[in-house]
Image (cartoon, rainbow, N blue to C red):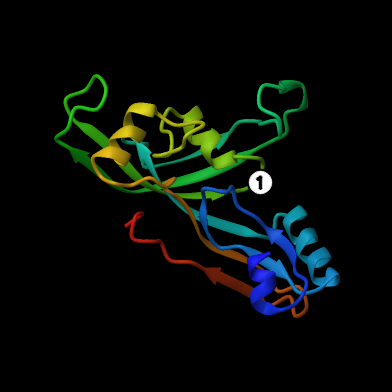
């Protein structure tokens, strides 16, 4: 509604994010463009890139191919879900969080190939590297450390880039978003 008020016309949401996730959103200005973009998503012609800070040292690169349901716990309706990732950096803090003497974290570039509900957050938790400050799928001890000691209260997951064929020209389109100071 806020963006609709800013541009002064009806918009069609095409790429949404979980409420605590920041970054790129995509809106179409008309129903035809929305349909075209929806077809691009269905044909997997849309490429999304996220940044996440996760607990622990995740492998340098990998792929999670783990089916997810849209309603957690209902595995009878699971659908294919694939997420690729690349570790960009690691950090070790001389602070005991949990049972270890130091706290380790990784900055990860994440590229979901599919778009299931909470897919990135659920896949990273599946790998035992939950996203920091994820209230639902995260590690409460590390979440508390980031909130209390570092003053960071936000989910450390951001949609930084989305690429897709333009709905009218079919030329490659690329939208990017920076990260906010809390994430930095």
Does residue 89 sit above or below 28 in this rendering?
A: above
Does residue 118 sit above or below 2 in this rendering?
A: above
Q: Is residue 155 visible?
A: yes
Which residue, given by chain and number where applicable, does mark 1 sit on? 115
For this rendering, which residue is in front, 107 or 147?
147
- Specify whether 7 is left or right of 128: right
Coordinates of residue 172 in the picture (x, y in percent): 64, 74
Please identify the quadrant where the C terminus is shown. Answer: bottom left
Coordinates of residue 106 in the picture (x, y in percent): 33, 42
Q: Is residue 165 visible?
A: no
Callout 1 environment at 10 Å: few (<14), some (14 to 19), or many (20+)? some
For this rendering, which residue is in front, 137 or 9?
9
* Residue in the picture at 36% in, 36% down: 58
* Residue in the picture at 38% in, 28% down: 140
- Specify whether 50 is left or right of 94: right
Please identify the quadrant where the N terminus is shown. Answer: bottom right
Does residue 42 sit above or below 145 in this rendering?
A: below
Which element type, helix, strand or loop, lies under badge 1? loop
* Residue in the picture at 24% in, 27% down: 97
* Residue in the picture at 67% in, 78% down: 7
Question: How many numbered marks appear?
Answer: 1
When asked about the image quadrant of residue 155, the answer is top left
Coordinates of residue 127 in the picture (x, y in percent): 46, 29
- Specify whether 119 is left or right of 57: right
């Amino acid at each position: 509604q806020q963006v609709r008020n800013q541009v002064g016309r009806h918009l069609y949401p095409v790429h949404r994010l979980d409420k605590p996730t920041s970054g790129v959103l995509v809106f179409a200005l008309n129903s035809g463009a929305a349909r075209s973009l929806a077809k691009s998503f269905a044909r997997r012609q849309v490429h999304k890139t996220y940044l996440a800070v996760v607990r622990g040292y995740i492998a340098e690169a990998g792929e999670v191919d783990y089916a997810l349901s849209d309603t957690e716990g209902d595995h009878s309706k699971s659908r294919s879900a694939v997420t690729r990732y690349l570790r960009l950096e690691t950090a070790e803090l001389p602070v005991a969080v949990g049972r270890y003497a130091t706290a380790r974290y990784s900055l990860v570039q994440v590229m979901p190939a599919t778009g299931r509900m909470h897919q990135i957050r659920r896949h990273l938790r599946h790998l035992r590297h939950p996203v920091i400050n994820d209230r639902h799928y995260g590690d409460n001890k590390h979440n508390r450390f980031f909130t209390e000691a570092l003053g960071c209260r936000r989910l450390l997951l951001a949609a930084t880039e989305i690429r897709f064929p333009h709905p009218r020209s079919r030329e490659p389109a690329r939208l990017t978003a920076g990260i906010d100071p809390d994430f930095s």
